Image: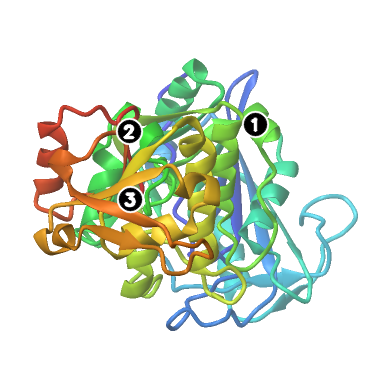
Amino acid sequence: MSGLHVLLILPAWITLFRHRLSLQATTHFTVLSLAISSYPVFNQLQRPRTSANCFVVAHMSSGLSERRRDRVSEVNMNPPKRLRAAGSGAETPRGEQGGERSAVDVDDSRKVVEGWRERLEARGIAVAISSHSSAQPRGVGYAKNKAISQSCGKYLCFQDADDVMLPQRVRLQYEASLLRPNSLLGCRVQRLPEGSTERYTRWINTITQDQLITQVYTSHGPTVVMPTWFCSRNWYLKVGPFDEGGKGVPEDLLFFYQSLRQGGGLSRVNQCLLVYRYHEKATTHSVTEHLFTDVMVPDLSTFTWETIWKLRVDFLQERVLSQWESFTIWNAGKQGRKLYRCLSPTNQKKVKAFCDVDEKKIQKGFYTYEESKEIPKPKIPILHYKDASAPFIICVKLDMTGGVLEENLNSLKLKEGTDYYHFN
């Protein structure tokens, strides 16, 4: 495989851009470049104003000259203005036999898409555009599934339309995928603007290979972040499809969980291969406290944060707590108590104690579960962490205590994934 450098710089908020690379005679790639077109630039998570999706399909062979490859690899940090979506009549890709469908534009999305068609075709990349005219947005999951079904690449490379793919990404992730055919592959990222979501970016780039598995329960969401995904089509077919529930459904989280249930692995190429763009209005600070650091869900009435919290709790119970006879919740405060209340009755009975470093909480002696219908109401002891026993579920946010939490865990000589798991 020659060192083909690929960079897809697309206008934001086009639903889906698909880019197939013929890098070898028998190897094809599909690059799924996704912006959440059903979710336009919204003001404080307002409902989207359009219901159409637009799919863009591009095909490129590896026969590009070095000069042409260099031009394709140029980095544009200032993509065109945010777009919503362009719709058209049916789901037949433009350019296929049967005639082209007329577009129903809600803004200038179609114009920008067509502009990319001209630029790509000028470089030997065939482009087809398809869309749907449903009365309601069909969501990101639908867009991904449709793109995959209309492509034939053996490997899938996901790319948000307003992020920047750096040179070598496809080659390096492809090579890694050959060794891990049943895995979701990621990479390190550079945040733009630099310094935004600093904790989250540090977490993405520095957690270890083992922690890609052990930290799947945290509020950050998937340990291999969606904009960096690369996997084989065969693995997608075994795990998928993506959930098509529509607005606000965390299709990446659901697919991620299902991949793990199917025995899939997780891995990261330890090079920065993506410029990951941050949007200030993507989430509110309050949302960040409760869920992912950088996830865009415009209609909270459709799929609430509490519902996603429940997904996380259920996955923790399914994968970890079902294997333990008893455990301690590390944090006697709000988050620890909330986790306890959300557990199944069976797992609530497994909680032998809360533990903390706060003397005021410890001096209370116990937590009373007032909502319980049991008589007498359950009282769970509150201990100093040095007096508590493993295993632990840690309900303290990572990288928020100046290293104190990590020092306390190390002092107890505990092993992550055996003696404790992070949940917050």
Q: Residue 275 carries which label?
A: 3
Could you tell me which residue is drawn at 16 percent across and 57 percent down? 362
**Mark 2 = which residue?**
211
Q: Mark 2 or 3, which is nearer the eye?
A: 2
Label 1 sits on a secondary structure element that is helix
Label 3 sits on a secondary structure element that is strand
Could you tell me which residue is drawn at 60 percent across and 56 percent down? 16
Could you say where residue 35 lies in the image, as x and y percent from the top left?
Answer: 52, 60
Nearer the N terminus, badge 1 or badge 3? 1
Neighbours of disc 2 within 10 Å: few (<14), some (14-19), many (20+)? some
Cα–Cα span, label 1 and label 3: 24 Å
Picture layout, residue 194 above or below residue 230: below
Cα–Cα span, label 2 and label 3: 23 Å
Amino acid type at image mark 3: Val
Cα–Cα span, label 1 and label 2: 25 Å
Neighbours of disc 1 within 10 Å: few (<14), some (14-19), many (20+)? many
Could you say where residue 79 lies in the image, as x and y percent from the top left?
Answer: 40, 64
Amino acid type at image mark 2: Gln
In the rendered structure, the answer to whether residue 356 lies left or right of residue 46 reads left
Q: Residue furthest front?
A: 376
Neighbours of disc 3 within 10 Å: few (<14), some (14-19), many (20+)? many
Could you say where residue 396 lies in the image, as x and y percent from the top left?
Answer: 25, 53
In the rendered structure, the answer to whether residue 348 lies left or right of residue 337 reads right
Q: Is residue 406 visible?
A: no
Picture layout, residue 106 above or below residue 234: below
Amino acid type at image mark 1: Arg
Nearer the N terminus, badge 1 or badge 2? 2
In this orientation, which residue lies closer to the viewer: 159 or 331? 331
**Mark 1 = which residue?**
233
